[in-house]
Image: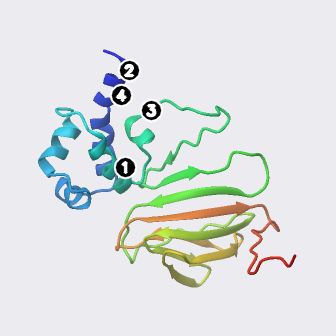
């Protein structure tokens, strides 16, 4: 068996893991992707090999790249291996920068959550800037319970107790820039004069 065959044969287990991590049924996934539940079941069981037309919507819905979905070997600059970090609660953190010091960038993908979920507030040294890409982000910042939607951003000192979470409306994707204490993102509101 050659490498492409082994790679495609391993996709079924990844598909099932991603679906179960999101805690959705085959029927729900079928509605999100346009792929029938029976086809999804056969793909997960390894009884059918996926096509590119099936992999694209599955990767999009699960919030992963095609490379991650098929377990492709890393390519490009070996110093920059931006592999996601999967957490036990179903969230995924994708590092976007790999340089020592300075502001670090991350993309977060969090699964849907109960609106009344009790936040686990944390503090640490630094400064954070978040920008919502998709979904609805619940940000508890001190005594403030904020709801941010796509295109909205928040900036705060991370010594303030804080917590991020999704809502029951679905998963959330957001960017986070984290810098050490006193280091902040520089936002320019207007172009510099010539």
| Quadrant housing the N terminus | top left
Give the CA distance from mark 4 to mark 1.
15 Å
Judged from the image, the secondary structure of the residue bearing numbered disc 1 is helix
Q: Is residue 52 above or below residue 189?
A: above
Judged from the image, the secondary structure of the residue bearing numbered disc 2 is helix
Looking at this view, is 145 or 171 the one in front?
Answer: 171
Extreme residue in the top direction: 1
Q: Which residue is mark 3?
A: 72
Q: Is residue 5 above or below residue 64?
A: above
Residue 82 falls in image quadrant? top right
Give the CA distance from mark 3 to mark 2.
10 Å
Residue drawn at x 49%, y 74% is 150
Residue 170 falls in image quadrant? bottom left
Which one is earlier in the sequence, the residue at label 3 or at label 1? Answer: 1
Which one is earlier in the sequence, the residue at label 2 or at label 1? Answer: 2
**Residue 59's disc number:** 1
Extreme residue in the left direction: 38
Which one is earlier in the sequence, the residue at label 4 or at label 1? Answer: 4
Badge 2 vs badge 1, beta-carbon distance below 8 Å: no
Residue 52 pos. (x, y %): 31, 41
Q: Which residue is mark 4?
A: 7
Q: Which residue is mark 2?
A: 3
Badge 3 vs badge 4, beta-carbon distance below 8 Å: yes
Residue drawn at x 37%, y 49% is 59
Judged from the image, the secondary structure of the residue bearing numbered disc 4 is helix
Decide: few, some or many residues near mark 4? Use Cα within 10 Å; few <14, some 14-19, many ≥20.
some
Which one is earlier in the sequence, the residue at label 3 or at label 2? Answer: 2
Residue drawn at x 19%, y 36% is 45
| Quadrant housing the C terminus | bottom right
Badge 2 vs badge 4, beta-carbon distance below 8 Å: yes
């Amino acid at each position: 068996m050659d490498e492409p065959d082994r790679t495609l044969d391993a996709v079924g287990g990844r598909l099932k893991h991603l679906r179960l991590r999101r805690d959705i049924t085959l029927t729900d996934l079928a509605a999100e992707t346009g792929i029938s539940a029976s086809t999804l079941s056969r793909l997960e069981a390894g009884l059918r090999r996926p096509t590119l037309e099936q992999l694209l919507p599955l990767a999009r819905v699960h919030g992963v790249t095609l490379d991650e979905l098929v377990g492709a070997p890393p390519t490009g600059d070996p110093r920059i291996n931006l592999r996601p970090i999967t957490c036990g609660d179903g969230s995924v953190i994708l590092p976007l920068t790999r340089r020592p010091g300075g502001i670090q960038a991350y993309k977060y993908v969090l699964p849907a959550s109960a609106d009344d979920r009790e936040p686990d507030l944390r503090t640490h040294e630094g400064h954070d800037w978040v920008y919502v890409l998709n979904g609805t982000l619940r940000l508890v910042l001190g005594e403030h319970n904020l709801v941010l939607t796509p295109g909205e951003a928040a900036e705060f000192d991370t010594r303030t107790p804080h917590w991020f979470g999704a809502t029951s409306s679905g998963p959330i994707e957001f960017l986070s820039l984290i810098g050490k204490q006193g280091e902040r993102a520089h936002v320019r509101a207007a172009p510099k004069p010539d």
